[in-house]
Image (spheres, grey):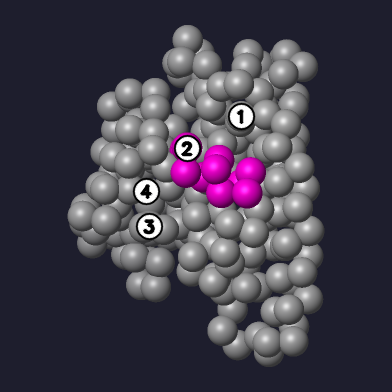
Amino acid sequence: MKLYYAPKACSLSPHIVLRELELEFELIKVDNKTKLTADGRDFFTVTAKGYVAALELDNGEILTEGTAIVQYLADLRPEKGLAPLPGSWARVRLQEWLNFITSELHTASAPLFNASLPEEVKTIFREKFFKRLDFIQDALSKTVYLTGSTFSVADAYLYTVLSWGKMLSIDLNQWPAIASYMAAINARPAVQEALRVEETH
């Protein structure tokens, strides 16, 4: 398998999952500005969407969209417990979290990165984003991880999106449960290795 990624992008989530699952894979860096891969290819020839993450399977199939990729990967090694079995109620709950993260956090953060938006507009988006963080804070004050006592693909995704807080000048210490959660996940060996490789690859 090949994972097309860009440093500090949402592709960190499947990268972490690949390492948690101890799967064999090749990392291919993508320049988000030029849309060229590290080996000189036009990334649009890999996926017409032109954005990471993209997972190239050994049979040549290309899978995009992080929430689809991490579930596919988790199902390759169900014994690792990163996702409940397909068809179970617990799996539906996991999908509920994945959809919340992608629609209410990941997408909602995009305007905050837009340098051309006036600050008063960003303030509106930031307040909405903070309300979502309040919701996450409440959830994490009652459980260790999003879906219970064990780390899941939803946690890899939430960690990735919340790690952008530094770039957005958002102090997550305002939400103590989130801050503790981020510290715990950051300490995981797979997370540390993914971060290290993305910084040096």
Q: Are marks 1 and 2 in contact (CB under 8 Å)?
A: yes
Residue under label 4, please give it. Answer: 4
Marks 4, 1: nearer the viewer: 1
Q: Are marks 4 and 1 in contact (CB under 8 Å)?
A: no
Residue under label 3, please give it. Answer: 6
x, y percentage for residue 47? 46, 52
Q: Is residue 56 visible?
A: no
Q: Is residue 14 magenta?
A: no
Q: Main secondary structure of the magenta part?
A: helix
Marks 3, 4: nearer the viewer: 3
x, y percentage for residue 29? 30, 55
Side (left or right) of 195 relative to 109: left
Marks 4, 2: nearer the viewer: 2
**Mark 2 neighbour density, 10 Å: few (under 14) some (14–19) many (20 or more):** few
Residue under label 2, please give it. Answer: 184
Give how far apart the Cα atoms at labels 4 and 1 are: 30 Å
Residue under label 1, please give it. Answer: 144
